[in-house]
Image: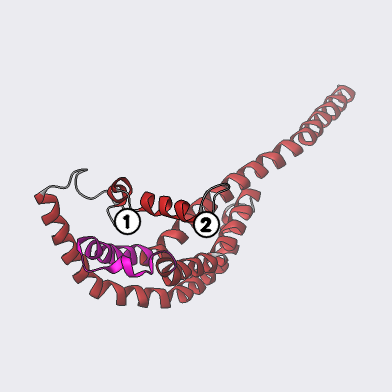
Amino acid sequence: MKLINKNSKEFEEAIVRRLVSPANLDVSGGRVYRGYGGNADMTVMNELARMGGVAGTSLASLGAFPAFDTMRQSLPMVQGLMLMAVYIMIPMVLMFSAYEFKTAITVTFVIFALNFLTFWWELARWIDSWMMEALYNSDTHSQWNMNGLQNTSDDVIMNLVMGTMFLVLPALWLTAFGWAGAKVGSELGNMTSNATSPAHSAGGKGGQLAEQAISKKVN
């Protein structure tokens, strides 16, 4: 580390003083996560509530983590069954919708969204496997002090949150993509209707003229 026209040792010393300054230590507090629990200035009741929450979360994790693992193993099975159900329903859905173009586009989007769920599950597994280790794997993260204990309890909460991402991310994806499919199908249906309406109108006028000509000859 060296600044132009500055002594290297002095520059390093200035950086170290800046990093360990009281202002920086007060901002971070030695904690990794900055949640919204408690008041801005923690009171005794907030601390007691935090301790109770940590104890409850730790106990809940004993049953939640095995449940998350079982859920993750079942995800490909659920995906296969959902695709099977959609493929079975396609003929009936198209028939009852009178083979409407909008319905066909929406069904296409649904099938693509279901097949793309694998990407979101792989992303959630990567986050669960490496994100915390990549960002927070250090000796200072789990020191035996109040901030270290707080970080450890936050790790448990973070693991629970990352476990739910296997359901939250696909749900968000299906909702957004289903809405997009319905909108695209509706717009394409309107475009098709608008494109054929002039021909339909011209054909109707031609039929009326022919009918009028025939009626005049008969009369």
Mark number, residue 142? none
Mark 2 vs mark 1: give the one in front. Answer: 2
Residue 91 in the image, given as x and y percentages of width and height: 60, 63
Residue 103 in the image, given as x and y percentages of width and height: 60, 52
Q: Amino acid at mark 2?
A: Met
Q: Quadrant of residue 147?
A: bottom left
C-alpha separation, residue under disc 2 versus residue under disc 1: 29 Å
Label 2 vs 1, first from the N-terminus: 2
Q: Amino acid at mark 1?
A: Tyr
Give the magenta-colored segment's residue range: 134-162
Of 35 and 116, nearer the camera is 35
Identify the residue shown where x is 62% and y is 58%: 108
Of 200 and 78, nearer the camera is 78
Residue 21 in the image, given as x and y percentages of width and height: 32, 49
Residue of label 2: 1
Q: Residues within 10 Å of mark 1 (few under 14, many from 20)?
A: few
Residue of label 1: 33
List the single residue furthest toward the right: 217
Residue 167 in the image, given as x and y percentages of width and height: 41, 63
Rendering colour mode = secondary structure
